[in-house]
Every structure is written in structure tokens, then in C-alpha cells.
Image: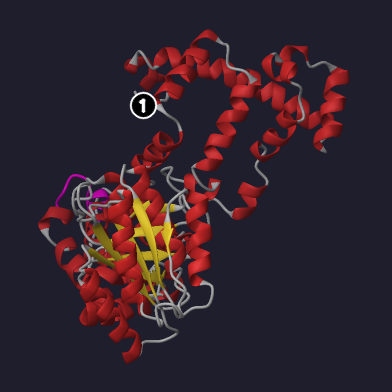
Amino acid sequence: MLEKLTCKFQDALKLVSGKSTITEKNINDAVEAVKIALLEADVNLRVVRRFVNSTIEEARGEKVLRSVNPGDQFIKLVHDKLTALLGGEEDKSGALTAGLKLKGPDAVSVILMSGLQGSGKTTTSAKLALRLKKAGRKPLLAACDLARPAASEQLAVLGSQIDVPVYREDAAAVNGDAVLVFKGAFRKAQETGCDVIIADSAGRIELDDAMMSELVRLRDAAKPDETLFVADSMTGQSAATTAKVFDEKIGVSGVILTKFDSDARGGAALSLKTVTGKPLKFVGTGEKPSDFEVFHPQRFAGRILGMGDIVSLVEKAQETVSQKEALELQKKMEKETFTLEDYLEQLRSVKKMGSMKSLLEMVPGLSGKVSEEDIENAETRLHEIIISSMTKKERANHLIIGPSRRSRIARGSGTSVADVSRLIKRFDKMKTMMKKMAKMGKNPAAMRQMLGAV
């Protein structure tokens, strides 16, 4: 995500990066490159002007020009400005729920989902429900979109996939009135102990009075705790413009951007807060229900500048692997009982965390530098296939895998004997390294020395 923007920003910052002294010309050249990067990313022109003017004004001050490391100070300034542009450091300590203002579990909270047709509102409703479920809430999905054919059926299918109840009515039975569907959903929530209703409202191909009138009626009946606008990030700055119109008509409390994993530019994310004054709460990063992230401005600013996002990477790992599993893995590493079966489980756990591309973008220095082709050709993609072709005995003790077994495994996995041999050799090296790291984990000084930090 945001690959083009990341590359452009990194090229711009090379003009000042690491310099012990910089001049106003260096600053002007760097800011001009940043300006072009933002315009090419389809960022709102007013937003670009404000960003550029404030950056130049501060960069020309003594704090940057006379600092010990002016190049690094300038990069920090750009990072801070990007963070502010993306929404600033808001309190999203609600972790999984991005600081959504919901009532306690003893009352029923309401989230009204709004947006244009085709923005991914129904899928996003299910993703949000899954996130709330992980946070300990009991969500109920309400199929209030009676305009789009099969919208309620789609929501029902998504609800069954994530094991979240869905309330729906036949459009003809309620005369196409979404308010009646919501009232039925509210009664259902009270009866079943659900504490959050996510109302999936109808969208339209374009803004019209009839659509807004229906939304206003639904909003007035639902009295939502949160009204979220769902936008397609691929539409660029127009997403921010449409969000502003929705806010003026029904009052939006936050925005969710879908298809963020396919957005190489970033115009929508960078324009939203300034144009609408509303925070970007979540981003959809894939097709799976779990491909849904809390949007942290500071962390995404770091990703854009190629600084990575280790905090989010760790959080993803914690969501996928429990503390108990992590401790068991550490013990196996220490005692050298880590097997190919364990390695296979780790490969599958990594896949649950998201695409390899999205994970590598969180590693400092790799953002914007890893192509799809590099990832597709990575050897680790073969490892799962090869290990899956082994017997339980072979996975438990790879030392028994001699020439004949390697030939059989290669035939079964559609690979070569050389591929199988490379995997076993790499696994041996990995076990040795893991044992060392497990022991050094108890000795921070040794760990830092091993990693070259001292």
C-alpha cells in the first residue's frame, strides 16, 4: 500500500538525509519534491499548499538549520507534519476498537454505516463486527440495505463466516422501510444480549436527495453512537469530498477506507482529516474478514517515509499467536526440540497475519522496496508445500530424511530434490540461530551485540 508515495518521499528526503549541514536551497528542493509527490498522490490541492507552507516555514527556522543533525531534524519535521495531516495522535487506546465511543456492555450501542454503493460497506460492516467480537463485545449485524438486490443475503453469508448473528427482513414485508428493520434488530439485540448493532444502510451510485432522506430517517430512529462513512481509497481525494457532504447531511463521526492494500497513491488518507475534520478510524487491507486495521496516523506516517511499523507488526503477531504458544515455542528453541512440524505451524501463523507484502512493509527499510515478484519468488513459499508432503515421522525428526525419502518428498510436492535439500539445510541453520537468540533473549546486552547494535 502507498508504494508510489513511499518511493517518492524517500527520493525527496535523500536530498537532505544524513547531511551535517543543509541550506535553504536543500530544503526548497526537498519540499518541492514532496509537493510533487503529494500532488501525484491525488491529495487535495488546499491540503498540499498548507502542508508545504508550514513545512518550509518551520524548516527554515533555527531548530532545523542549526541543529546537530539538520538532515535528520528535517526528516523528523516531515514525519510530524505527515502525522498531523493524517489525523494527529488521537487517543485510540481502545486498541481493537480504535477509540469508538460505545456504551457499556449492559446497554445497546449503535453504529450506522454509510457510504456510496460499491465502496465495500457491507463487507466492512462484517469486518467491524469481527473486530468488536475480538474486543469482547457481542455485535449484531442489521441488514438495513433494502435497495441493493441480495444485500441482506450477502450480509447473512458474511455473518455466518464470522459467527455473528444477522437480523434481516424481507423488503416487501416492511414496505422497503429500513427504519422498521432497525427497530426489529434493536428488539432482537435486547432479547439475545447483543450489545452493539451495526446497521448496514443502503448506498447509491451517486449522491441524491432520496438517499439522504432515507439516511436521515434511519439516523433519527437509530440515534447512533457512531456514524461511520465507508469510502473506497482508490477514488483518491474525491473520497474526502464525498465524506464532507455526508457529514453535512447526517453528521459523520469517523471514516473507514476500503481497498487500502491496493492504494499506491494515498490521496484519500492524506486529504480526509483536513477536508472533513473527521478522523480516519479503520482501513480495509484485504478480502478476508480479518484484513482490517486500526488507522494510527503516526505509524502510517512512518510507513510512508520507509521507517516501517514494528508496533503494528508485533500487535498482529500477538493477535495470531497466544502468549502460551509463544512461551512453548521459546522452550522448544532453547531445548532444540523445534521440529519441521513447528516450522510449518509458524508459516501458517504468518499467513494468518496477512499478506507477506503487507508484513514486510512494516519492517524498517523495506517499505516500498519489496516488489510483488520478489515475494512470489521467495523460497519460503515452497517450504509449506514441501513439509506438507512429509510424513509425521519425517516432520518430527528431519535427520531421517535420506536420499530416497528426499526423492519421494520432491515427487509428492512437485519440487526437486535440490529444493528439499535446501529446505533441510536452511532449517538446520535456523535451529542453531533460534537457539542462540532464545538464550540471548535472557541477556539483552548479548542480544544487542549479536544484532550489531553495540
Comparing 241 with 111, the one in front is 111
The answer to whether residue 298 is above or below residue 61 is above
How many other residues sit within 10 Å of disc 1, few (<14), some (14-19) or many (≥20)? Answer: few
Percent across and percent down for residue 296 are 29, 53
Percent across and percent down for residue 130 are 41, 50
Label 1, secondary structure: give it: loop
Comparing 80 with 212, the one in front is 212
Which residue sits furthest left? 62
**For this view, does 276 lie left or right of residue 447?**
left
Which residue sits furthest bottom? 209
Say if residue 26 shows up in the picture: no
Q: So how many labels did they put on this image?
A: 1
Comparing 241 with 17, the one in front is 241
Say if residue 319 shows up in the picture: yes
**For this view, does 403 lie left or right of residue 187?**
right
The color scheme shown is secondary structure
Residue to which mark 1 is pinned: 453
Picture residue at 34% right of the left edge, 23% below the top: 454
Magenta stretch in the rendered image: 66-74
The answer to whether residue 346 is above or below residue 363 is above
The answer to whether residue 277 is above or below residue 196 is below
Picture residue at 53% right of the left edge, 19% below the top: 433
Which residue sits furthest top? 335
Comparing 165 with 242, the one in front is 165
Percent across and percent down for residue 273 are 24, 68
Q: The disc labelled 1 sits on which kind of residue? A: Ala
Percent across and percent down for residue 334 are 49, 11
The reply to whether the magenta stretch includes residue 68 is yes
Picture residue at 52% right of the left edge, 14% below the top: 332
**For this view, does 205 lie left or right of residue 181?**
right
The answer to whether residue 298 is above or below residue 393 is below
The reply to whether the magenta stretch includes residue 386 is no
